[in-house]
């Protein structure tokens, strides 16, 4: 019987979730769901200086908003709990003591300056930087002398002098690392806290994690973690190291080239469906097209289709998915999405009509406010104040009589679009673009947007007549 699939997302709460983090969480969630497995959430907050509780709270909110619920983790604890590393120090201490008794770790008294000098010397001589083993064979007296100097030791793992570490990566294939190239590495910091290499590997084993998808910057960590697992007699998960996400300029995605945190995207009005549909396709090839829910994407997620080349994030692609996501919203959800940008006090029937009218023509909520102003403000559209605007040109070409005819039609037939256009066509003999464009620009100040027929009742007869009369004065 095959082992159940267990994946995890293990963020450090030292900042906001960015799209690289989110894609890692998404891919692990999709892989678990495809195989009927479990998705765990672990908060790696052992770095007391950088970890902040508000970031931990926010990342839980971000993941829930995206739809990535976890099977075990904060708030859903099981036998492997706790899922915050800051609460697991006793487990780390016990495991480190086992390694100490086995002679597989040793105290290192080297200062940061000494380590930097050694690193630079190695680089200058053309050697890869690795720990030189300065403290590896100190005797008791030498260690006591360093303690007497007030040095606080780290604890280093004793890497075998010979041999190699081999594993197969789900993305990069067969990997071979010579132990001699790794160097002894820190498993416990000078302040007594467990280092990333150690706590991360131990927790994966204790929590039964079988597959880890993470960024390719962690690929070089894997042989060290394999050695830790072997020393503790525990299994290692299968790893897959995901390609880098870059911006339009080919550089790693960052604030400089347009990256935004998930919170920023959410607050700007981007929908979770748009984000996870785009991320599904960044570094993962699939024949599935269009918008899909998470359950459908999970059916089509395949680690065999993970690419090695950097994946380029393009805001234009996000806009495409966002447009499709907005258009697919139910009227009720669309109203909630627009709520912060709607005028206060709209009657329920007016709200429903407004949402239905503009939903096919907006991508972000800020556009809702723009259309609300166009429809409900008593003032003429702002574009009409600019004599050089397209609106003013079309109004001049249409002429004063055109808009007086439109105002008269509203006075006679109210907000009936068909009656309005029929009356103006009869009075002016204009048709097609020569009829519709001036009307649209006089009413909205733009040449695009929702169909005018459902907008007219929302604007109201008095505003319609006032806007046409104002256009007549500008013609």
Image: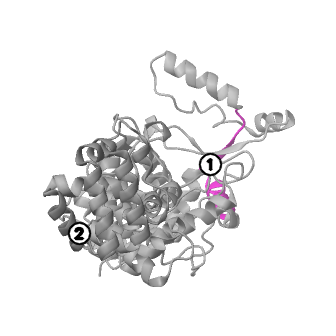
Mark 1 or mark 2, whichever is nearer to me: 2
- Residue at (37% x, 40% y) in the render: 247
Q: Quadrant of the N terminus?
A: bottom left
| Residue 142 placement, left or right of 32 | right
Q: Which residues are magenta?
A: 93-110
* Residue 205, above or below 330: above
| Residue 321 placement, left or right of 18 | left
- Residue at (39% x, 71% y) in the render: 461
* Residue 344, above or below 99: below
331 or 216, which is in the foreground? 331
376 or 224, which is in the foreground? 376
| Residue 64 placement, left or right of 433 | right
Q: Quadrant of the C terminus?
A: top left
- Residue at (46% x, 27% y) in the render: 128
Residue 289 spot, x, y in % from top left? 19, 64
470 or 259, which is in the foreground? 470
- Is residue 253 in view from this perspective? yes
Residue 293 spot, x, y in % from top left? 31, 73
105 or 240, which is in the foreground? 240
Q: Quick one: label 1 or label 2, which is nearer the N terminus?
A: 1
Residue 92 is drawn in which quadrant?
bottom right
| Residue 73 placement, left or right of 323 | right
Helix, strand or loop at label 2? It is helix
Helix, strand or loop at label 1? It is strand
Per the image, the residue denoted by label 2 is: 300
Q: Is residue 258 rendered magenta in the image?
A: no
The Cα–Cα distance between marks 1 and 2, rounded to whole angstroms, is 44 Å
Image marks 1 and 2: residues in contact by CB distance under 8 Å = no
- Is residue 237 in view from this perspective? no
Per the image, the residue denoted by label 1 is: 105
Residue 471 spot, x, y in % from top left? 36, 52
* Residue 298, above or below 371: below
């Amino acid at each position: 019987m095959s082992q159940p699939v267990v994946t995890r997302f293990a963020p450090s709460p030292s900042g906001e979730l960015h799209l690289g983090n989110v894609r890692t969480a998404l891919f692990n969630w999709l892989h678990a769901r495809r195989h009927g497995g479990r998705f765990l959430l672990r908060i790696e907050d052992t770095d007391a200086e950088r970890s902040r509780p508000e970031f931990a709270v926010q990342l839980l909110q971000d993941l829930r908003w995206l739809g990535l619920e976890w099977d075990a983790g904060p708030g859903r604890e099981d036998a492997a709990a706790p899922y915050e590393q800051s609460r697991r120090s006793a487990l780390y201490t016990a495991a480190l003591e086992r390694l100490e008794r086995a002679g597989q770790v040793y105290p290192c008294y080297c200062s940061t300056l000494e380590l930097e000098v050694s690193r630079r010397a190695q680089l200058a001589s053309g050697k890869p930087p690795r720990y030189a083993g300065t403290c590896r064979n100190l005797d008791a007296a030498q260690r006591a002398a360093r303690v007497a100097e007030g040095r606080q030791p780290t604890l280093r793992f004793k890497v075998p002098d010979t041999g190699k570490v081999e594993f197969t990566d789900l993305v990069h294939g067969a990997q071979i690392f010579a132990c001699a190239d790794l160097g002894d590495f820190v498993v416990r910091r000078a302040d007594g806290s467990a280092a990333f290499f150690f706590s991360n590997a131990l927790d994966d084993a204790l929590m039964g994690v079988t597959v880890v998808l993470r960024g390719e910057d962690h690929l070089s960590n894997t042989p060290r973690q394999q050695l830790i697992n072997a020393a503790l007699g525990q299994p290692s998960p299968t790893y897959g190291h995901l390609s880098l996400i870059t911006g339009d300029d080919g550089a790693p995605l960052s604030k400089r080239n347009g990256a935004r945190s998930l919170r920023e995207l959410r607050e700007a009005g981007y929908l979770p469906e748009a984000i996870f549909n785009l991320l599904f396709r960044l570094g993962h090839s699939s024949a599935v097209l269009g918008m899909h829910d998470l359950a459908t994407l999970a059916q089509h997620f395949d680690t065999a289709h993970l690419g090695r080349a950097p994946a380029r994030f393009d805001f234009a692609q996000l806009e495409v998915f966002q447009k499709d996501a907005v258009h697919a919203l139910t009227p009720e959800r669309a109203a909630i999405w627009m709520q912060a940008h709607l005028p206060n006090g709209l009657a329920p029937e007016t709200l429903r009509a407004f949402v239905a009218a503009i939903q096919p023509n907006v991508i972000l909520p800020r556009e809702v406010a723009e259309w609300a102003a166009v429809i409900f403000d008593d003032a003429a559209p702002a574009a009409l104040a600019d004599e050089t605007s397209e609106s003013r040109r079309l109004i001049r070409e249409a002429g004063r009589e055109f808009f007086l005819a439109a105002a008269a039609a509203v006075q006679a037939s109210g907000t009936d679009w068909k009656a309005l256009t029929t009356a103006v066509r009869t009075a002016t003999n204009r048709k097609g673009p020569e009829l519709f464009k001036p009307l649209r620009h006089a009413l909205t100040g733009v040449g695009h947007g929702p169909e005018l027929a459902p907008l007219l009742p929302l604007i109201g007869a008095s505003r319609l007549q006032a806007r046409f009369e104002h256009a007549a004065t500008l013609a």
